[in-house]
Amino acid sequence: MATITPTKENATIKIDKKPFLSRYSKTQLSGFVTLCVFSVLLIFPLLWMVSTSLKAPHEVMSLSMKFIPEKILWSNYVDIFEKYPVWNYMWNTGFLTFMNIAGKLISCTLVAYGFAKYNAPGKNVLFVILLSTMMIPWAVTMVPLFILFKEIGWYNTFLPLWVPSFFGDAFSIFLLRQFIMGIPKELEEAAKIDGAGVLRILWSVVLPNLKPALAVVAIFSFFHTWNDFLGPLIFLTDPAKATLQLGIQSLRTQFNVEWQYMMALSVISIIPCLIVFFIGQKKIVEGITLSGIK
Amino acid sequence: MLLMNNSFRISPKLREPLTFYLLISPWLIGLLVFVLGPIIASLVLSFFQWDLISPAKFIGLRNFKEMFTIDPIFWQSLKVTVIYVAFRVPLALVTALILALMMNQKVPGIGVFRTIYYLPSVVSGVAVSMMWIWVFNPNFGLMNGALSAIGISGPGWFSSTTWALPTMILTSLYSVGSTAIIFLAGLKNIPDTLYEAADLDGASTLQKLFQITIPQLTPTILFNMIMLLITSFQVFTEALIITGGGPANSTMFFNLYLYQNAFAYSKLGYASALAWILFTLTFICALYVFKSSRKWVYYEGGE
């Protein structure tokens, strides 16, 4: 570390530059360069998408590729709202996302609390079953679920896409259980002595301590529902009920794909994910670490 | 509510199990209705011929016989999926491990890298598939544009029978960052004392990598390998959006073929039979990895 005395303010820039490189070893520097290259590879396609969404049609279909459009057409984004029911797509997607988050938060907290703090015969077997349901491919349950929802008249409604979330989700239950196990017993016992019931303890003792884990569940289920394509594809046929993902796909089925609009709608669908990602970033990293390591 | 009402007399011995089952009841109901019920129904359906209109007809093992003896697309979809898994899983593991190792070296801007690497995992969905179609567009795409700038005329990518599947494998690496971040967490758990001891013995960087880092990381490698295996067998959205299985079935993934049977051809029995083949295949692979892991996964204190 270069020691810089705060009094020599003029000299700091000079001193700082040289030690910066020498502070790191060769392997560190080559690692840094590789990481930079890889970052560019990941970011560039997204920027290309944004760039295309701002181009005029003749420039989209042009062999000379310009990264910055000759004329930046923000109007593409206005046009797309006029040409396609984008507000409708957003509302439908937002509604489903909200319901899924609410459903998972409520049901998974109850179930996770049960698994974390109560004992009963059969509990261990049930917990193994819970974990193994995460391994079942969706293809196995897809056909019977389709038939079931069709039989009870839920086909072409939003119901099959959110009602199941009120019955728990194995991954979220597991995550919350891990977290609840870490909450000290003393807190609950004090409340028990005061004569509080199970739900009372859950509400006033466990929940306030569970907020970070609940945030992780909410964030993950946001991404999951917002980006879900298969569910809406199977259960929704009415164009008025289409989600953003179906909406993007519907731009493609036309004879001639207008790529500037396709990319604009794609950008629109991605923005909420980016916002949630940047707000919840720290929590997400904690979440995957919590679920990934033991 | 029963849960809160202490005056409702239940013997104290029963109270705890009862509370447990009441608390987990939403999941239990969901398990029966949305998971176990459908699994049994799917197994039963796989022995039937049913198009939802005419009554279901029991045909014994004919669905399975048909896929193994008559249906060429079944074998093609199996081949495509197995090739995809066989290339994607090791490629993703190695790439993620390298990225994690580099991020673990106390390089500047680690927070920024972590953000950038994880970002593609949260924007998955149709938009990203569309992005790939556009980036790999043979005429106006970024990829061929960049290649022609250095004098190479690029292939048709997704529209070429030889390139479509490799391009799918390549684009799947876009979400490799989430695997890398799990590796990074694993790396942070390796005690520094091990490296300090190795330094005293004069071990080289490579020696430390293969003698300390990789062995210590094997539990994380196992976890990532299983997760990648399961998700790779289940590829669907990309296949449906980007290529629709083409050209000439060169990207006909198993789940895509299954989806077509169920919803395009209304062969619900056949689709269910296909699902069980996929389930069995995934299960056998995961089981094999687990069994072999006893030989290569290092556990502290030997489990």
Image (spheres, coloured by chain):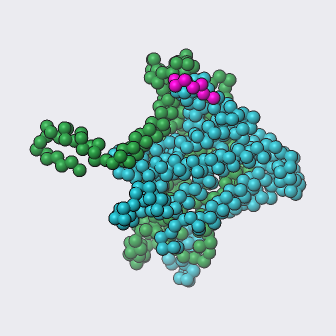
Chain colours: A green, B cyan
For residue A260, say whether it is visible.
no
For the point 46% across and 62% down, the residue is: B211
A70 relative to A119 in the view: left or right = left
Q: Is the residue B218 above or below the residue B124 in the image?
A: below
Specify the segment rendered in magenta.
B148-155
Q: Is the residue B181 above or below the residue B253 in the image?
A: below
Q: Position of residue B287 (x, y in %)?
A: 66, 63
Q: Position of residue B2 (x, y in %)?
A: 55, 71
Marks counted in the figure total 0
Near-viewer residue (B9 or A91): A91
For the point 53% across and 82% down, the residue is: B12
B141 relative to A182 in the view: left or right = right
Considering every residue shown, the one lying at the far left of the view is: A7
For residue B94, say whether it is visible.
yes
Tell me which corner region of the image, top left, top right, bottom left or bottom right, holds residue B261. Answer: top right
Considering every residue shown, the one lying at the far front of the view is: B202
For the point 59% across and 71% down, the residue is: B21
Near-viewer residue (A188 or A185): A185
Q: Position of residue B239 (x, y in %)?
A: 66, 40
Q: Position of residue A68 (x, y in %)?
A: 44, 23
Tell me which corner region of the image, top left, top right, bottom left or bottom right, holds residue B293. Answer: bottom right
- Helix, strand or loop for the magenta stretch, by majority: loop
For the point 38% across and 75% down, the residue is: A186
Q: Is the residue A253 above or below the residue A9 in the image?
A: above
Magenta residue check for B113 = no
Near-viewer residue (B100 or B172): B100
